[in-house]
Image (cartoon, rainbow, N blue to C red):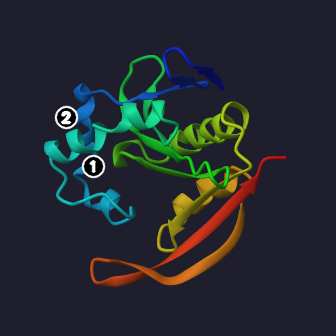
Amino acid sequence: MIFDSQDKTITTKRLVLRLFQKSDAIAITKLCNNYNIYKNTLYLPFPYSLQDALTWIEPHFNNFNANKSYEFAITDKNTGELYGAIALSNNQQFNNGEIAYWIGEEFWGNGYATEAAQATLQFAFKEKQYHKVFARYFNSNPASGRVIQKLGMKQEGILVDHVKKENRYEDLVYYGIINS
């Protein structure tokens, strides 16, 4: 993982994590306007519109500069193709943050979420000096759980029927890791 503070990018073996641009809005809309992504995420609307993408992108740059949160586009290192997104919140009071991500369905199964999450975890611990990073996922989405487990995170608990999605309650599984 190489973090370039000038460009605000993280480079891995196959990926470049970079800030979103307004020009990404069409690709974001195409990837997010997908029921299978919607049903596995807490906050994405469905259907997903171009305006949703533009509204979502708007605060990213200021949030990054204010050390509030870091929202990265997950892109192919060679072609620049957008695969998804990964975010890291920053709770400065408690020196921790949450990793959250989504990958476009056509790119599932290639390890992009894991590679991006590993780099984001390193960014949190090495660059931002977090004490702890956590993540959560719907119990109905074990693939997301496997990404989190590959980071070395340990399960801290299950919040039973904690959120409501499409008129059904979902368990949220919480994982965390301490910077050691």
Tell me where residue 13 appears, x and y as whole percent.
61, 24
Position of residue 61 relative to residue 141, above or below, is above
Residue positioned most to the right: 180
Asked whether the beta carbons under mark 2 and mark 1 sit within 8 Å of each other, the answer is: no
Residue position marked by numbered label 1 in the rendering: 32
Disc 2 from disc 1: Cα separation: 10 Å
Specify the quadrant of the image occupied by residue 63.
top left
Tell me where residue 123 appears, x and y as whole percent.
64, 34
Disc 2 residue type?
Answer: Ile
Position of residue 91 relative to residue 127, above or below, is below
Residue neighbourhood size for the residue with mark 2, other residues' Cα within 10 Å, grouped as few (<14), some (14–19), many (≥20): some
Tell me where residue 23 appears, x and y as whole percent.
23, 25
Q: Secondary structure at mark 2?
A: helix
Q: Is residue 177 visible?
A: yes
Q: Is residue 30 visible?
A: no
Residue 2 versus residue 147: which sits nearer the camera? Answer: 2
Residue 119 versus residue 131: which sits nearer the camera? Answer: 131
Position of residue 108 relative to residue 82, above or below, is below
User: Residue at image x 45%, y 16%?
Assistant: 78
Q: Count all numbered tags in the image, as a single digit.
A: 2
Q: Secondary structure at mark 1?
A: helix
User: Residue at image x 61%, y 68%?
Assistant: 174
Residue position marked by numbered label 2 in the rendering: 26
Specify the quadrant of the image occupied by residue 81.
top left
Choose the circle earlier in sequence order: 2 or 1. 2
